[in-house]
Image: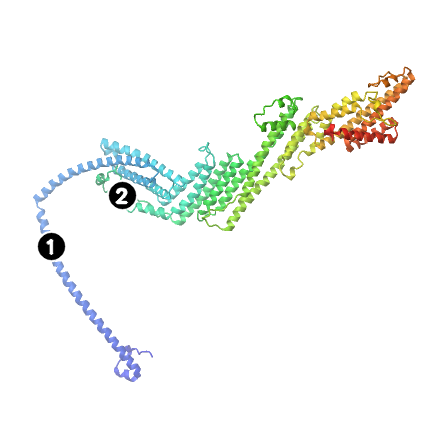
């Protein structure tokens, strides 16, 4: 139940008439509470009034005492303003001003001494060693500021004495040089990176720069970033590093980039601002390090410096750079610095022509970036990684194209050899058994002997050796490139074990660096090799066509066959070049076969086919009598052919070359024999028409055949006809033997078959006799085929 409001009650009767008993009790209780509150308030007011009364009384007492003291002071002042007293004070003041002039001169002399001491101190501090160089730079900057203040304290030098003026002018001139030396020392500290460089030294160097140039935090950061950018540019400058273009300069430029990002994030804005703020917390001359510098002797000269110097505090803006501004400045620098880094990397790579050197550089650069590039907060390391990959890959592709293009030198060497071809010299074939080989000094080891034997066996004379050596050098380059590409595929690009990196990031990086890049290089290598071999094939084909109708086309064909053989023996394993040079081989074999066949055939036509009697006729067997061995001319033909093949070179006679030789030889043999048959028929017609017969002499040693010669002309004519028939029979045997030698391909030629049919008709033999001849020739070839091994 709510308590009634007592402020509305006007009388006691109203309480008892309008309220219930509980309400009356509540009103009674409320009235007692109000009475207690008012009693306490009245007591408080009375106490406060009493204290104010006491305070007023104390004030009146103090006012009376102050009034009495003022009266005493006024009385004393009146006594001191007398004429005699004032005159005495004027005289004393004149004496005091004279002493002040002396003190001012002493102050100027002391400041000049301190000026020279400051110059020497700065020089000594800048010449110090590596230890504590950050502290020395800050102390040198403080001394330099003190020297600047001392120079400024003299004002205009025209009013100074001669010695003091000269000293001040000299100090003013050296001030700028000392400042430049200090700034250069600061730049050296800021440029250096590595294990021996402490980040604290960098902070102190920035503090020294701020003192020396009165720069705020923003200007200090801008100066630091510009110094690092210049250092990166210097590392990639070809004029500055003309003799030192190596991996170290590239890696140092990359380290400068990454360390700058890390240093700025570590020092700016908090540490740099705190360091600049500490410079402003005390007077310059109160600095303990400055007081402890013995050469300055501030314990003596400090009191002569004046208030402006003694109480000078550096004024530096330490709060003009916040975190957002620092991040923006660093981001802008990172963009420009990345461009400088990539451009410098490209310029450095332009002076590197070795594929392995670039691959090693790639490994070092990417490992450096993977290790340090991800440590900088707020920067995506994949962007710079892509730029580095692109720059390196572009150079690798260019070097790859350049190395593959050197295959043109093989074609150029062939062209030069063909243009300067000298018969008997260029195509000179050194025998394996000549005196030079037999007298060869073997003390040099087996390698030299082996090389010489292989060269002579495979016909590698000087002309061929030059081309083969050129191709082997090219092939070695390409093999090394292929090995390096395989090495790239096996590389692992894991981050430092102390760093925790996402597995997806590692997998993506491994895909880029160990799969995509090597595949790009391998694809380019295969394409350029295919194109280079295509151009070389066209070049060789053109060179061969230009010499196809030359009188030396035989030796030239041998030269080109050997070159194609050695090149094809070491072809890269590519499907597109598997048939390199094969389209020219048939024509080369044709010219080779013609060159080898012509001398034996000419000798055969001029000696064997002109004979009119059969040597060894008495050795014929059977009924009818048939030959069992070839004529001496045919045997000599085969021997001459083998010797001609050997003189050309045993290395030339592959199965394809032998087959071409057999076809060519068989065709030319038929032409020679047909020509002889035609001339023989003409001789018979002439003999029948004129009925003339020349005496003939039977060849051989048989005395029986010599006794059969009759002096009668009729019998002589009949004997001539029979002997011609024996020649045909011998020829038929020889042709069967040559069929065994030349094989089915040569003997299946239509002209060859027609010749055999015509010769068979001239013999007048039955088919059974022909079978006997074929079988006898086959048995003879089995016994003697090893004598003609190159044809088998």
Q: Position of 135 compared to 361: left or right?
A: left
Q: Would residue 394 appear left or right of 173 to someone viewing this image?
A: right
Foreground pick, 593 / 323: 593
Up the image or down, 93 lies above or below 704; here it is below
Seen from the viewer's position, the closer of residues 137 and 753 is 753
Q: What residue would you read off at disc 2? A: 288
Mark 1 residue element: helix
Q: Which residue is mark 1?
A: 69
> As rendered, which of 21 and 248 lies closer to the eye?
248
Q: Is residue 92 above or below residue 763?
A: below
User: Based on the displayed image, in which of its 4 quarters is residue 531 positioned?
Assistant: top right
Quarter in which the C terminus is drawn? top right
Q: Nearer the viewer, mark 2 or mark 1?
A: 2
The answer to whether 77 appears left or right of 639 in the picture is left
The residue at the point 58 percent across, 34 percent down is: 476
- Res 786 label: none
Q: CA distance from mark 2 to mark 1?
A: 48 Å
Looking at the image, residue 718 lies above or below residue 169: above
């Amino acid at each position: 139940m709510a308590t009634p409001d007592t402020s509305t009650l006007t009388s006691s009767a109203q309480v008892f008439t309008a309220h219930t008993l509980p309400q009356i009790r509540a009103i009674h209780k409320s009235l007692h509470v109000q009475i207690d509150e008012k009693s306490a308030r009245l007591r408080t007011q009375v106490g406060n009034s009493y204290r104010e009364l006491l305070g007023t009384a104390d004030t009146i007492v103090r006012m009376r005492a102050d009034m009495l003291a003022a009266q005493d002071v006024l009385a004393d002042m009146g006594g001191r303003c007398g004429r005699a007293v004032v005159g005495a004070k004027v005289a004393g003041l004149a004496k005091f001003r004279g002493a002040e002039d002396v003190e001012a001169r002493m102050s100027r002399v002391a400041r000049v001494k301190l000026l020279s001491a400051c110059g020497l101190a700065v020089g000594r501090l800048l010449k110090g060693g590596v230890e504590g160089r950050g502290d020395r730079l800050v102390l040198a900057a403080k001394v330099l500021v003190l020297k600047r203040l001392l120079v400024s304290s003299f004002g205009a030098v025209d009013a100074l004495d001669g010695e003091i003026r000269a000293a001040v002018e000299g100090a003013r001139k050296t001030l700028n040089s000392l400042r430049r030396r200090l700034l250069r020392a600061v730049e050296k500290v800021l440029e250096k990176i590595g294990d021996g460089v402490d980040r604290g030294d960098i902070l102190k160097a920035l503090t020294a720069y701020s003192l020396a140039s009165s720069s705020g935090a923003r200007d200090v950061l801008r100066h630091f970033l510009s110094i690092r950018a210049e250092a990166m540019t210097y590392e990639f400058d070809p004029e500055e590093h003309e003799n030192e273009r190596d991996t170290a300069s590239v890696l140092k430029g990359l380290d400068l980039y990454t360390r700058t990002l890390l240093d700025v994030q570590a020092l700016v804005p908090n540490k740099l601002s705190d360091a600049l703020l500490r410079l402003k917390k005390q007077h310059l001359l109160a600095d303990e390090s400055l007081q402890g510098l013995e050469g300055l002797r501030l314990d003596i000269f400090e009191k002569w410096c004046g208030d402006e110097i003694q109480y000078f505090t550096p004024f530096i803006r330490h709060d003009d750079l916040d975190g957002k501004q620092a991040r923006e400045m660093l981001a802008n620098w990172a963009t420009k610095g990345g461009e400088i880094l990539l451009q410098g990397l490209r310029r450095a790579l332009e002076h590197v022509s070795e594929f392995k050197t670039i691959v090693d550089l790639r490994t070092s650069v990417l490992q450096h970036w993977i290790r340090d590039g991800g440590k900088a907060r707020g920067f995506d390391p994949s962007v710079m990684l892509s730029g580095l990959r692109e720059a390196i890959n572009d150079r690798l592709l260019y070097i790859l194209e350049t190395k593959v293009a050197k295959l043109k030198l093989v074609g150029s060497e062939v062209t030069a050899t063909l243009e300067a071809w000298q018969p008997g010299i260029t195509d000179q074939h050194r025998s394996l058994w000549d005196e030079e080989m037999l007298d060869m000094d073997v003390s040099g080891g087996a390698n030299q002997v082996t090389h010489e034997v292989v060269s002579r066996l495979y016909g590698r004379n000087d002309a061929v050796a030059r081309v083969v050596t050129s191709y082997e050098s090219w092939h070695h380059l390409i093999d090394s490139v292929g090995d390096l590409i395989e090495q790239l595929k096996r590389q692992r690009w894991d981050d430092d074990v102390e760093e925790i990196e996402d597995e997806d990031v590692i997998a993506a990086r491994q895909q880029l660096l160990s799969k995509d890049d090597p595949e790009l290089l391998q694809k380019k290598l295969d394409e350029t090799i295919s194109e280079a071999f295509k151009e070389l094939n066209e070049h060789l084909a053109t060179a061969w066509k230009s010499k196809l109708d030359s009188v030396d086309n035989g030796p030239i064909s041998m030269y080109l066959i050997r070159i194609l053989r050695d090149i094809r023996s070491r072809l890269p394993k590519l499907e597109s070049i598997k048939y390199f040079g094969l389209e020219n081989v048939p024509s080369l074999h044709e010219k080779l076969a013609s060159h080898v066949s012509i001398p034996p055939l000419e000798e055969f036509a001029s000696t064997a086919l002109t004979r009119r009697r059969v040597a060894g006729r008495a050795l014929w067997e059977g009924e009818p009598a048939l030959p069992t061995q070839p004529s001496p001319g045919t045997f000599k033909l085969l021997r001459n052919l083998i010797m001609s093949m050997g003189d050309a070179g045993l290395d030339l006679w592959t199965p394809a070359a032998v087959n071409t030789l057999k076809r060519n030889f068989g065709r030319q043999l038929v032409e020679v024999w047909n020509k002889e048959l035609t001339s023989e028929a003409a001789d018979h017609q002439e003999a029948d028409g004129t009925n003339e017969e020349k005496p003939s002499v039977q060849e051989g040693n048989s005395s029986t055949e010599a006794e059969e010669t009759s002096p009668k002309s009729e019998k002589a004519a009949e004997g001539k006809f029979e002997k011609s028939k024996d020649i045909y029979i011998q020829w038929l045997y020889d042709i069967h033997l040559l069929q065994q030698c030349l094989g089915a391909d040569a003997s299946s030629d239509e002209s060859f078959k027609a010749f055999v049919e015509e010769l068979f008709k001239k013999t007048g033999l039955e088919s059974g006799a022909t079978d006997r001849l074929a079988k006898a020739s086959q048995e003879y070839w089995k016994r003697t085929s090893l004598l003609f091994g190159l044809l088998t």
